Image (spheres, helix red, strand yellow):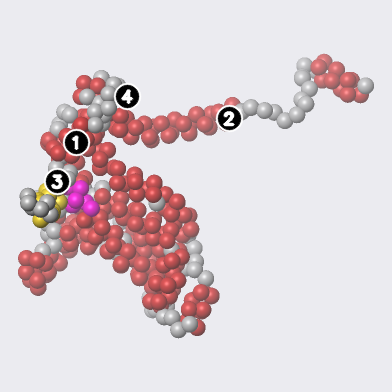
Amino acid sequence: MASEASALRTASNGRLPVDGPRSGISLSRVGIYAVLFAGVLIAVGPFLWMISASFMTLSEVNLTRLLPENLLWENYATALRRANFLDIEIATDPQTGVLQSLSISGYIWNSVRITLISVLGSLTVCIPAAYAFARMRFVGRNFIFALFLSTMMIPGIVMLIPHLLTVIWLGRLSESLFGPAGAWFNNWPALTIPFFASVFNIFLLRQFFIQIPDDLWEAARIDGAGHPRFLVSVVLPLSKAPIMTIITLGFIGSWNALMWPLLVTINDEWRPIAVGLSNFVTADTPGDLNLQMAASVITVIPILVLYFVAQKQFTEGIAQTGIRG
């Protein structure tokens, strides 16, 4: 009787009784999802249209269609050929079919070489430097590290001319010592060596290295290990995530480089794929938007593959470094 009376009082007040928790999605949550979806659409939409347009005819692109009527895979073959992205020449013996020579050229091959040299060089320089700042004690360590960090506040565009003058001077010095073989300008040293010592990479690795427990270092010292052995045997195996992070960031930076290669090269012998894409878009195919989109997709495929393969290590590397210091 008491429950019935309560229900009658609730009904008389114009309110329905509530038997349990509310179900469904609130309006505020719907609004949040709508904003997030709009943000994703704005960010990903142009990329998805680029992929779609790369399979279209030129007339379909001009009509701003969202999807192609037929998938024109030949757009990619045409873009590769006309943009000189990759040229492979194979010579075999006509009698035996044995490979005699293999020649690889083109912007993609240049980018592969530049990226490999840059990433390996950066790892070689940044890992010992970060370890020294994190685990070793020497006079002026904190001051030098603060001086390193202060250079991150300088815009990269401001450093282009000083870097260029440094490369020219070092190139002349190298040529005077080793002859034409030591040339920097219009060669791989100018495209890679200036970026071996990355302040951000050193900072990222240092922040991770200082989180390694000192007990491991004490145990290594008891076993007779010094700093080099401790770095190789203990620190590096524990640092896969931040190392993969700097590999990913270094790969993206080298692969997408445009302005610096234009400054230090005079022909296409060492120019990377970003320069080739720029030339293809502005000079070779000013009106062929479908071919331009195909060339753009070819350019970003290696970056997407690397990111999806290293996505877990990349996010872990950023999350684990923190700001301890």
Name the residue that disc number 4 marks: 67
Residue situated furthest front in the rendering: 95
Compare marks 1 and 2 and give the one earlier in the sequence.
2
The mark closer to the camera, 4 or 1, is 1
The correct choice, above or below, for 45 with respect to 279 in the image is above
CB under 8 Å between discs 1 and 2: no
Percent coordinates x, y for residue 92 in the rendering = 10, 51
Q: In the image, what residue type sits under mark 1?
A: Ala
Q: Which mark is residue 36?
A: none
How crowded is the residue under tag 4: few (<14 C-alpha within 10 Å), some, or many (20+)?
some
Q: Amino acid at mark 4?
A: Leu
Residue position for label 3: 87
Give the distance between the C-alpha atoms of the residues marked 2 and 4, in whole angstroms: 34 Å
For this rendering, which residue is in front, 95 or 49?
Answer: 95
Residue 42 lies left or right of residue 319; in this view the side is left
Q: Which residue is mark 2?
A: 28
Label 3 vs 2, first from the N-terminus: 2
Q: Position of residue 291 (x, y in %)?
A: 20, 32
How far, Cα to Cα, is label 1 from label 3? 12 Å
Amino acid on which disc 3 is placed? Asp
Q: Are marks 3 and 2 in contact (CB under 8 Å)?
A: no
Q: CA distance from mark 3 to mark 4?
A: 31 Å
